[in-house]
Amino acid sequence: MGWLYTHKMPEESVKDFFKRQFDFDNSNRKGEVLECKVVKLRTAYIAFKVINRETNTKKIRAIVCLLDYRSNEYQNIGYKDMDESMLPNAQECPQSILKLLTDTDNENAIEWRQACRDTIKERKTNNNQYTRLKKILQKGDIITLKSGHQYEFSFVAGRSIVGYSVVRRQHYRLPARMIDFETTRNCVLTTV
């Protein structure tokens, strides 16, 4: 289960690339990529349909492909593919892919799907809290990270909150996933 490096044509989409890699048709089964979404440029989530002609059944499963790019080489893309039943650590599958999947009784696949749904829910919650927090923060308010480190709020830069570390005497971008919203919400009311 290592990495496979191959050539992807510049005009070819990632979905078309994986269709070329994974689609098959033989006397017993037919498999095809239905949908493909790339998250953070490094992970492709694929809804893959397999039709078993002997039993006349159709199953749609998830395939997760970790991606690597080598633009200066002929073999310019690498991928490591895993089936959802392998319980991949990459658990940011978009809702649009999850909706396409058929029911399964594989415990690992069920656990992976739930982890992806939890990630989607957590991201929505964090984004809502993050947006509200950016609106009420004032210069000097204290932001607490999940690690316990505290930063003095400086300013909002685009979609990021920038905090100042008194200890390190530097400004840092503070991603939503690192902010402890419960503690920060309480601290926002008092300024330094």
Image (spheres, grey):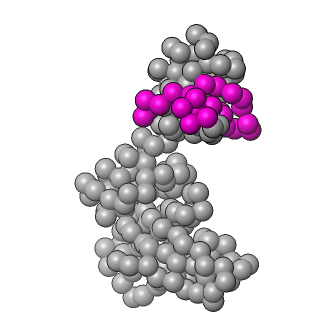
What residue do we see at 72% from left, 31% from top? 156
Q: How many marks?
A: 0
What residue do we see at 35% from left, 53% from top? 112
What residue do we see at 32% from left, 51% from top? 110
Residue 47 appears in the figure: yes
The foreground one among 83 and 149 is 149
Q: Is residue 141 above or below residue 32?
A: above
Task: Please state if 6 lies on the left or on the right of 162 as rendered.
Answer: left
Image location of residue 180, percent across then percent down: 47, 28
Q: Quadrant of the N terminus?
A: bottom left
Task: Please state if 120 lies on the left or on the right of 82 as rendered.
Answer: right
**115 magenta-colored:** no
Q: Quadrant of the C terminus?
A: top right
Q: Is residue 94 above or below residue 64?
A: above
**159 magenta-colored:** yes
Q: Which residues are magenta?
A: 146-169
Image location of residue 135, percent across then percent down: 69, 21
**Residue that protrudes farthest toward the top in the picture:** 190
Task: Please state if 148 lies on the left or on the right of 16 as rendered.
Answer: left
The foreground one among 163 and 27 is 163
